[in-house]
DNA sequence: AAAACGTGGGT
DNA sequence: TACCCAAGTTT
């Protein structure tokens, strides 16, 4: 296929030197692919280096406890990836003697490994000719072929996967897959693609029809929900506080936070200290103060958390208390980590 | 099978 | 500012 050859030619000239491109070790490839799901290379790179240093083999990762894995993952987001990563590491280490599955089909059975990741690992590590379809591939193909099927519709997913599979260079599928992705990331970018110096300009349908900026098509945007978080930060004379693990469904599962009083609308100090949750937490009198003089709005992909941090000085708390020195050992959301940095800085 | 799941960079 | 979107997967 001409397109494949052109992409590979471009890739060999323009590719980025990345640590996971020096190896076919499936542990490293798997780790990098999980980290890069919905994540830019620049953001994932330091985490890849930290993980490979801390856990040189899948056995090392399997041995760690989940909290340590989450701590190292802290700040990378989509924490289910870290939990699935750890689960799969244990599975591979304990059930498969540390040997990763070698086919697309078997790789798909691993937790956290979907169509894209199975294709990436199978092609890069084992030369299986299975095409990856990530955000870059959707963009490159929709423009090059002028396809306006919404990429997040069932029809689009199927259509693009089938098309991608017909284009793959079966003699070097791993190189081809990385070529089309790097081309999408660096050249056929979402905004300001480099069409004027594009090796595919002659045959690009979107360019010919002046539709580049309209492709790919994505249907419907999610609507953002607002939530109101009041974090209660206990401080005792013994230099203790309280940290709780987030459990069950929802955001930040497995991460830690201060006791949270969530409300559907803004509330003031009076309502807060009269609330049942607050009075239950503190049996003795307290001194309360707001840490920031304005609300912190922490933005997630699909919700805005309007947040206040309340410093509560007290003798005793109706929860398990820990020393402040222990706090930084726990994995916490970025929202909490930012507060901690400023609070501990101010405190010292 | 639509919705949930984080964070940060870019415009 | 607000919105897009980034090497997607799970439920």
Image (tube, coloured by chain):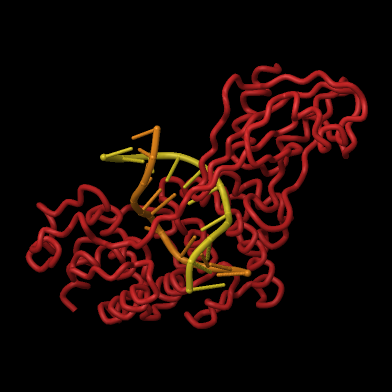
Chain colours: A red, B yellow, C orange
From the top left corner, tell me how far across and down residue A60 is, in percent. 67, 59
From the top left corner, tell me how far across and down residue A263 is, in percent. 68, 40
Q: For residue A13, what is the image quadrant? A: bottom left
Q: Nearer the viewer, residue A165 or A262?
A: A262
Horizontal relation, residue A13 to residue A152: left or right: left
Horizontal relation, residue A55 to residue A317: left or right: left
Q: Nearer the viewer, residue A257 or A156?
A: A156
Q: Which image quadrant: the N terminus of chain A?
A: bottom left
Q: Which image quadrant: the C terminus of chain A?
A: top right
From the top left corner, tell me how far across and down residue A344 is, in percent. 68, 23
Number of marks present in the image shown: 0
The residue shown at (8%, 63%) is A208
Horizontal relation, residue A76 to residue A314: left or right: left
Horizontal relation, residue A169 to residue A313: left or right: left
The residue shown at (59%, 31%) is A338
In this rendering, the answer to whether A36 lies above or below C11 is: above
The residue shown at (44%, 77%) is A126
Q: For residue C8, what is the image quadrant? A: bottom left
Q: For residue A119, what is the image quadrant? A: bottom left
In this rendering, the answer to whether A334 lies above or below A111 is: above
In this rendering, the answer to whether A91 lies above or below A324 is: below
The residue shown at (37%, 65%) is A134
Q: Nearer the viewer, residue A12 or A32?
A: A32
From the top left corner, tell me how far across and down residue A254 is, in percent. 70, 52
In this rendering, the answer to whether A319 lies above or below A147 is: above
């Amino acid at each position: 296929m001409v397109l494949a050859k052109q992409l590979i030619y471009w890739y060999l000239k323009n590719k980025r030197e990345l640590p996971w491109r020096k190896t076919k070790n499936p542990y490293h490839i798997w780790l990098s692919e999980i980290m890069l799901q919905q994540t830019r290379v620049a953001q994932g790179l330091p985490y890849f280096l930290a993980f490979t240093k801390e856990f040189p083999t899948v056995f090392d990762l399997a041995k760690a406890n989940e909290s340590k894995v989450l701590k190292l993952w802290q700040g990378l987001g989509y924490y289910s990836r870290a939990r699935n990563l750890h689960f799969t590491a244990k599975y591979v280490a304990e059930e498969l003697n540390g040997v990763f599955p070698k086919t697309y089909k078997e790789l798909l059975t691993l937790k956290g490994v979907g169509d894209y990741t199975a294709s990436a690992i199978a092609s890069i590590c084992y030369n299986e000719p299975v095409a990856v379809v990530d955000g870059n591939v959707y963009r490159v193909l929709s423009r090059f072929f002028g396809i306006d099927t919404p990429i997040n519709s069932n029809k689009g997913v199927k259509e693009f996967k089938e098309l991608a599979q017909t284009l793959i260079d079966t003699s070097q599928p791993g190189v081809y897959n990385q070529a089309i992705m790097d081309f999408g990331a660096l050249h056929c970018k979402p905004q300001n693609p480099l069409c004027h110096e594009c090796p595919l300009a002659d045959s690009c349908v979107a360019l010919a029809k002046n539709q580049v900026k309209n492709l790919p098509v994505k249907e419907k945007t999610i609507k953002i929900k607002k939530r109101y978080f009041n974090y209660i930060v206990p401080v005792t004379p013994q230099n203790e506080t309280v940290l709780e693990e987030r459990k069950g469904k929802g955001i930040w599962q497995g991460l830690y936070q201060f006791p949270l009083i969530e409300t559907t609308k803004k509330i003031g100090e009076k309502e807060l200290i009269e609330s049942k949750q607050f009075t239950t937490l503190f049996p003795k009198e307290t001194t309360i103060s707001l840490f920031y003089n304005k609300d912190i709005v922490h933005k997630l992909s699909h919700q805005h958390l309007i947040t206040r941090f309340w410093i509560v000085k007290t003798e005793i708390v109706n929860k398990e208390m820990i020393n402040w020195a222990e706090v930084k050992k726990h994995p916490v959301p970025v929202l909490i980590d930012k507060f901690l940095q400023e609070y501990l800085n101010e405190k010292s």
